[in-house]
Image (cartoon, rainbow, N blue to C red):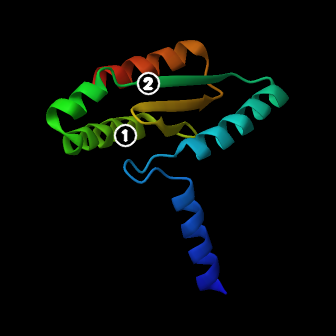
Amino acid sequence: MQELQTALESVKVEALTDGLTDLANRRMFEDTMLRRINDAGADKSDLCLVMFDIDLFRRLNETWGHSLGDQVLRYIAAVLRAHAQGDVLAARYGGEEFAMIMPRTNLYLAEALAARVGKAV
């Protein structure tokens, strides 16, 4: 029974994780965002969302190949992961789009975090 439970948890994690970057995938992002919106409404707390998009990513792929593009995506995922402290969720929203959900975070702190991520990238 324990093996079955472990296998089920593993499949659940895989279903909610982006295979290339190991960040939360869009499904996990959407589920978490809905839950965080409800939580913030219930306890009247702050909630911020930061979206990141890699400019000219298609041109990078066309010029240098998808292998390099994948490396860039994994690098950016690592930067986001390093900056996602506590209950901040870093996710690959799609293609070259990423997001960070920041519960109980005001706009000032969210902007500062976004600036640190941008500088690191």
Q: Is residue 84 above or below residue 21?
A: above
Q: Are marks 2 and 1 in contact (CB under 8 Å)?
A: no
Question: In terms of secondary structure, where does tag 2 sit?
Answer: strand
Q: Amino acid at mark 2?
A: Phe
Q: Is residue 31 left or right of residue 41?
A: left
Q: Is residue 97 left or right of residue 110?
A: left
Q: Is residue 93 above or below residue 11?
A: above
The residue lying furthest to the bottom in this view is: 1
Q: In percent of the image, x 29 and y 21: which residue is there?
A: 56
Quarter of the image for the C terminus: give it.
top left
The front one of 70 and 2 is 70
Q: Is residue 83 left or right of residue 5?
A: left
Q: Earlier in the sequence, mark 2 or mark 1?
A: 2
Pointer 2: residues within 10 angstroms few (<14), some, or many (20+)? Answer: some
Pointer 1: residues within 10 angstroms few (<14), some, or many (20+)? Answer: many
Please identify the quarter of the rendering in which residue 38 is found. Answer: top right
Residue designated by label 2: 52
Q: Amino acid at mark 1?
A: Ala
The residue lying furthest to the right in this view is: 42
Residue designated by label 1: 77
- Residue 90 at what x, y percent from top left? 49, 38
- Residue 74 at what x, y percent from top left? 31, 43
